[in-house]
Amino acid sequence: MAALGHVKFAVFICLSLLTFIYSDQGKHSRFEYKHSFKGPHLVNKQGKVPFWNHYGSAIPSEDQIRITPSLKDQKGGLWAKTVTEKEFWEVEVFLKISGRGRVGGDGTAVWFTEDAGHPGPVFGSADKWKGMGLFFDSFDNDGEQNNPYIMVMVNDGTKAYDHHKDGIHQQLGGCMRDFRNRPYPVRVKIRYYNNILTVFYHGGMSNRDEDYELCMRAENVQLPKQGIYGVTAATGGLADDHDVIKFLTHSLTPPLSSEEQKKKQLTEEQRKKFEDQYEQNVKKLDDQKEEFQKAHPEQKEKKQAEEKYESVYERDVRLMYEAANAIHQLVMKLHGKTGELAKEVNTLHSVVSDGKGKDQGDGSIRQEMNTLISLQNQIHSIVKEQQERRSAGQDTNVLNNIESNIRTVLENVSHLVTSAQLKNTPPLPPSTPACPTVNCVSTSTLLMCMALQLFVGFGYMIYKGHQDQAAKKFY
Ligand code: MAN
Ligand code: CA
Ligand code: CA
């Protein structure tokens, strides 16, 4: 499978090369990736454009490099790290120059110079360069109303650019175009071949490749045999965003002799052979994929199952939600039950009060009193647990209500016990039992109280268990 992938990749590379090396108007054009960049993934992890250095205000991002933001007096630049190997070349640069003002400044420059530039006064780069600079000059410094202007200036390292006159007398050639705030990127294609320098301009009114027009052409141009490409920009009192979107470089070489052509150029037959091979390999890959799926159906099922069932995260969230819901239900139930219990004990209390003085006390009263005391103890322990829970920061209104209900029960039971104790002083010997004349507290009532009591305790245990489980899910 992996070998197949490599074959596929190799064939793809060959086909790509075939498209890069082609004969065009008697010259060969070859894409130079080390002197180019384009989106959508312009920057590496270090935030740099591979094979390029940037300085000043330039900020590379995924799909463009902002050489200057629209702030006053900014300078920025981007220069290829390596020199060119071929004497003749063609670069195509995509730019966006935009600003809110009717007039902007100052402009962008595309360079081919002997050495890489550094920050300076000429559109963000150093003066007295050796080589060529093409300037998108937005601001009309000399007031001749001839800007925005695109111009080429060749320098042998001796001339200082005349910023105040927009270099009007220093230009090799140019054309006046408004390149600011265009709907699509504006483009420039600079071709240097056989010492002829030609500049084509694309006004950014469309995204079509064929919308280029000739801006300038000059013969007998002497540029360094080897050089470095750069793109820089600057703002002054006025400011624009100067963004570069693409920089595509091709080296241009003379056509090969017929002998060389035979050796180097891939014939149509070979091309067809590669294409067929590629098709076959793709088919083979598909067949193998199918075979693998047949041989390992569990893999497919596994994948389907993974899609069908929820993820660990989804399950945890769902469980937490369900647990919280269950706790809520339980607490509400507990709330209702303690209310009932309170009512029950109140009834008990009034019955005991009514029977005061009538009851002479006997064994059954003593037994009931003992049950009441144990009931009191149990309720007391619940109240204590409630207090602990509240001190752990888990108090809610409902839990408070439960507690207050239990407190009422506790008070009433205390009262009941005290009344019963008073009645039985001094305690009667068990040998002389006497039936009460009034049925003050029935055994069934007491048993019901105890059942409720147990229910409360049991409910609380379940609630606590749920809560512990829910708490564990957070770790
Ligand atoms: C000021 C100066 C000039 C610059 C213009 C336009 O006048 O900074 O150098 O060209 O603003 O930005
Ligand atoms: Ca200017
Ligand atoms: Ca001018």
Image (cartoon, helix red, strand yellow):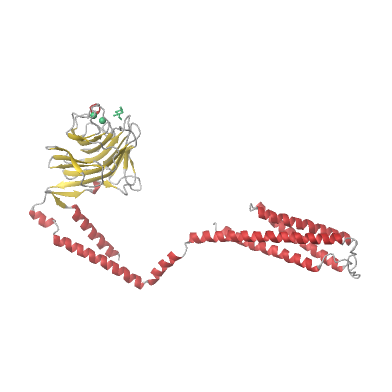
The answer to whether residue 29 of the structure is visible from this angle is: yes
Up the image or down, 302 lies above or below 211; here it is: below
Q: Quadrant of residue 408?
A: bottom right
Q: Is residue 49 left or right of residue 427?
A: left
Tally the numbered discs: 0
Up the image or down, 69 lies above or below 341; here it is: above
**Residue 449 in picture, x, y percent from top left:** 75, 64
Q: Is residue 218 left or right of residue 319?
A: left
Q: Kindly identify the residue that appears in the image at 62 percent across and 60 percent down.
A: 329
Q: Residue furthest bottom?
A: 295
Q: Nearer the viewer, residue 350 or 158?
A: 350
Quarter, ligand 1 = top left
The answer to whether residue 80 of the structure is visible from this angle is: no
Q: Nearer the viewer, residue 111 or 364?
A: 364
**Residue 260 in picture, x, y percent from top left:** 10, 54
Q: Is residue 431 left or right of residue 302?
A: right
**Residue 52 in picture, x, y percent from top left:** 28, 43
Q: Which quadrant: the C terminus?
A: bottom right
Q: Nearer the viewer, residue 140 or 225?
A: 140
Q: Kindly identify the residue that appears in the image at 18 percent across and 56 percent down.
A: 18
**Residue 96 in picture, x, y percent from top left:** 29, 40
Q: Quadrant of residue 331?
A: bottom right
Q: Which quadrant: the N terminus?
A: bottom left
